[in-house]
Image (cartoon, grey):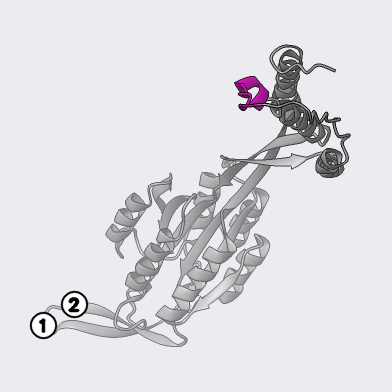
Amino acid sequence: MTLLSQISFKNPLFLFLILLIPLAYWIRPKKPTVIISDLNLTQEIPIGFWAKARPLLSLLRGIIVLLLMIALARPQIIDSQSKTSKEGIDVFIILDISGSMMAEDFKPKNRLTVAKSVINDFLKNRKEDRIGLIVFAGQALTICPLTFDYHAVGEILKTIKVGMIEDGTAIGSAIAITVNRLRDSTTSSKIAILLTDGENNAGEISPKMAAEMAKLFGIRIYTIGMGKEGGAKIPYNDPIFGKQYREIRVHVDEETLEEIAQTTSGTYFRATDTAKLESIYEEINRMETTQITTTHFRNYREISIDFLLPIAIVLLLLEILLSQTKLRTLP
């Protein structure tokens, strides 16, 4: 919360009355003087302190009039307050760790390694959001619930590898688990980012049915199809010749991924290289920003009643006292 103060006048036109003060002084009536020509003074008559201080009465009157004119303009102190509140987003990262994610068509690394690196960079750009992590192959598993501890998510991300779960591609099951985790969330924005390089071939829930469930709970899903067109080589260890490669053909079911995104008001992306995958996560990061709300408050405090009028009254009393005592003049 921030607090700023400033002064303004509710009736600023009254300030022009101040210009009348020097005019009134200039046209004031002059006091008559008496010249005594036949008085022979052999020495100067000393002038006392109070005689010298007599112009003080005019000064006091001028200050009193000035204060009253400023009071008529109604000066006010305005206290401006602003309160900023941030509402984060609940985000689940859904990552495919099936065997085909070992394909090395994202040279010099395999698909999974590249995906983990890009997701880790995505985490660094989030500030007020809760992040969770779900992996899937033949079945789906929540390996990190929603948390603000991005460092913990990053450390868990490092441990993910192919073979943690039986092989397969259970896209529908992964979405269903995400819905179960996000359905009770009270944030205004709930999203999931699903990355896969294949098509649904495992699990008991179809991707279409899972997407309808996500829509029901207001969960938006961004889908990413990863991998180059055509075949890809997956490494394996040969007991005799060591590291070898075998050619595989993995089909990215773009039609299903597009349907999932469209059903949940998300977007489908296709990543065929590292640069494209990085740009996809950057675009999602820009689209899903934390909601920041700023509320402004203004409080007006009158200066006239609290400050100017009391001073004017005190000076007026002082002027009356002096004019009737020490600075009194005879007619």
Circle 1 sits on which residue? 240
Residue in the picture at 75% in, 36% down: 75
User: Is residue 37 shown above or below 144?
Assistant: above
Q: Callout 1: 10 Å neighbours few (<14), some, many (20+)?
A: few
Say what secondary structure mark 1 lies in.
Answer: loop
Residue 60 image-quadrant placement: top right
Residue 237's tag is 2
Residue in the picture at 82% in, 38% down: 25
User: Is residue 309 shown above or below 272?
Assistant: above
Q: Is residue 50 magenta?
A: yes
- 73 vs 179, left or right, is right
Identify the amino acid type marked 1.
Ile
Position of residue 61 measured from the top left corner of the image (x, y, whole percent): 77, 28
Viewer-side residue, 108 vs 176: 108
- 180 vs 23, left or right, is left
Residue 275 image-quadrant placement: bottom left
Measure the C-alpha gap from mark 1 to mark 2. Answer: 9 Å
Quadrant including the N terminus: top right
The majority secondary structure of the magenta stretch comes to: loop
What stretch of residues is rendered in magenta? 42-52
Viewer-side residue, 84 vs 306: 306
Identify the amino acid type marked 2.
Asn
Quadrant including the C terminus: top right
